[in-house]
């Protein structure tokens, strides 16, 4: 997911260390914007000390829903260089805890607890950059793209953005008016191509599913700056991104020029069933040491539990968000020992080589695991 082009223990022990963990903020909601019939944007005021973030990063929103703490990651659609406030967009999801609770309960003046901005789907902007960002987004996958587009247009006067944006119908297009205004303001530097599953009769754009034939025609019509100056970004439904990546690979686009951000429903929304542990023959429990926020914790992780689950069961408030191994909010560095990950997509190849692990999908497989977070 990184886009760095440039992705129950039996016993717990604690002692002091020197690391520092993520910070939390209570942000006041300045405005609630109804973007579409099922999507809203929450505009937050900065606290007294302004929150720093990069275009494409996300905020983790924390709320108590049904008596239980729920955390969800939402990409910032605001730009750190052109917007005075912070803003995230939430789209209702059938069965989603937070995605339905927030629109029903949060109003202007409400206070929401958030974890500091995180995420690697970003880049360093430079005034003398001259590059072409080709973006493919579907539905709410537009949110990090909006942040990156606004920042690119302001920070890099020689760069251009081409956006291919897929939606169900014209009423479900998030930020439609904003993109119309940006195309007028930055004429020639922003090209937005809409694709609708169900288009109205007078629709002049593309309609139907974004298949290989359609995407090929679209790519042939956008400015061609060559492989060296063009980067491809994707965020949206997994099926859409898989099809797009297959086509880009067929066009011999190097893998290092293709980046994607994955949105998944948190495991807290799912009825998960753990496989029973077979005594005597199966995997064994192992002790883990976690250093976080100035403390050192020791606890035993059973083979059918993750490091994060076990820590939370023991009252250790480690950082986390998606619980699916994609957002990297729970990332830590394994200083020793071996950790097996159920999902590795959230980490780049270089991060894995350096020993980084994700506690929400991590299982210790040796007794000498020491993880430092922060």
Image: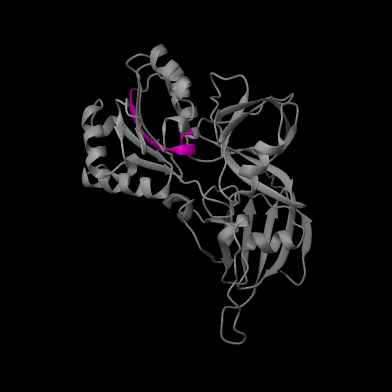
User: Residue 81 appears in which quarter of the rendering?
Assistant: top right
Is 27 displayed left or right of 267 in the figure?
right
**Residue 219: x and y, percent?**
25, 33
Instruction: Name the residue furthest bottom.
Output: 280
Residue toward you, 310 or 13 = 310
User: Residue 41 appears in which quarter of the rendering?
Assistant: top right
Residue toward you, 174 or 352 = 174
Whether residue 224 appears in this view of the structure is: no
Residue toward you, 57 or 6 = 57
**Residue 145: x and y, percent?**
45, 32
Residue toward you, 40 or 281 = 40
Residue at 65 percent across and 36 percent down: it is 103
Residue at 50 percent across and 33 percent down: it is 143
Residue at 56 percent across and 32 percent down: it is 76
User: Residue 168 appears in which quarter of the rendering?
Assistant: top left
**Residue 365: x and y, percent?**
56, 71
Region in magenta: 130-142
Is 336 displayed left or right of 208 in the figure?
right
Asked whether residue 103 is drawn in magenta, I would say no
How many labels, in total?
A: 0
Instruction: Name the residue furthest front.
Output: 201
Is 83 displayed left or right of 25 in the figure?
left
Whether residue 251 appears in this view of the structure is: yes
Asked whether residue 138 is drawn in magenta, I would say yes
**Residue 289: x and y, percent?**
68, 62
Is 56 displayed left or right of 224 in the figure?
right
In this picture the colour scheme is one colour
């Amino acid at each position: 997911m990184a886009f760095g082009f440039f992705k129950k223990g039996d016993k717990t022990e604690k002692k002091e260390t020197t690391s520092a963990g993520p910070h939390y903020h209570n942000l006041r909601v300045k405005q609630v914007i109804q973007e579409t019939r099922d999507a809203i944007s929450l505009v937050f005021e900065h606290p007294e000390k302004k929150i720093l973030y990069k275009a494409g990063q996300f905020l983790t929103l924390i709320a108590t829903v049904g008596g239980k703490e729920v955390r969800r990651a939402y990409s910032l659609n605001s730009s750190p260089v052109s917007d005075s406030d912070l803003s995230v967009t939430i789209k209702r999801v059938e069965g989603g805890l937070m995605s339905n609770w927030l629109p029903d309960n949060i109003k202007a003046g409400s206070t929401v607890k958030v974890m500091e901005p995180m995420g690697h789907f970003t880049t360093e902007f430079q005034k003398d950059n001259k590059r072409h960002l080709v973006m493919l987004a579907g539905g709410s996958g537009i949110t990090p793209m909006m942040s990156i587009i606004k920042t690119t247009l302001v920070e890099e006067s020689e760069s251009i953005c081409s956006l291919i944006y897929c939606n169900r119908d014209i009423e479900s297009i998030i930020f439609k008016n904003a993109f119309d205004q940006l195309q007028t303001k930055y004429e020639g530097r922003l090209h937005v191509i809409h694709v609708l599953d169900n288009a109205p009769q007078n629709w002049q754009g593309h309609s139907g599913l974004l298949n290989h034939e359609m995407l090929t025609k679209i790519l042939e019509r956008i400015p061609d700056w060559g492989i060296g100056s063009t980067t491809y970004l994707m965020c949206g439904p997994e099926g859409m991104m898989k099809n797009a990546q297959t086509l880009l690979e067929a066009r011999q686009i190097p893998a290092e020029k293709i980046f994607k951000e994955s949105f998944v429903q948190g495991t807290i929304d799912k009825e998960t069933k753990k496989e029973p542990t077979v005594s005597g023959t199966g995997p064994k429990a192992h002790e883990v040491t976690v250093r976080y926020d100035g403390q050192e914790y020791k606890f035993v992780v059973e083979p059918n539990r993750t490091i994060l689950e076990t820590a939370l069961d023991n009252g250790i408030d480690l950082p986390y968000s998606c619980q699916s191994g994609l957002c990297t909010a729970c990332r830590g560095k394994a200083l020793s020992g071996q950790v097996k990950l159920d999902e590795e997509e959230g980490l780049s190849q270089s991060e894995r080589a350096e020993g980084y692990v994700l506690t929400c999908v991590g299982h210790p497989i040796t007794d000498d695991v020491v993880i430092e977070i922060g």
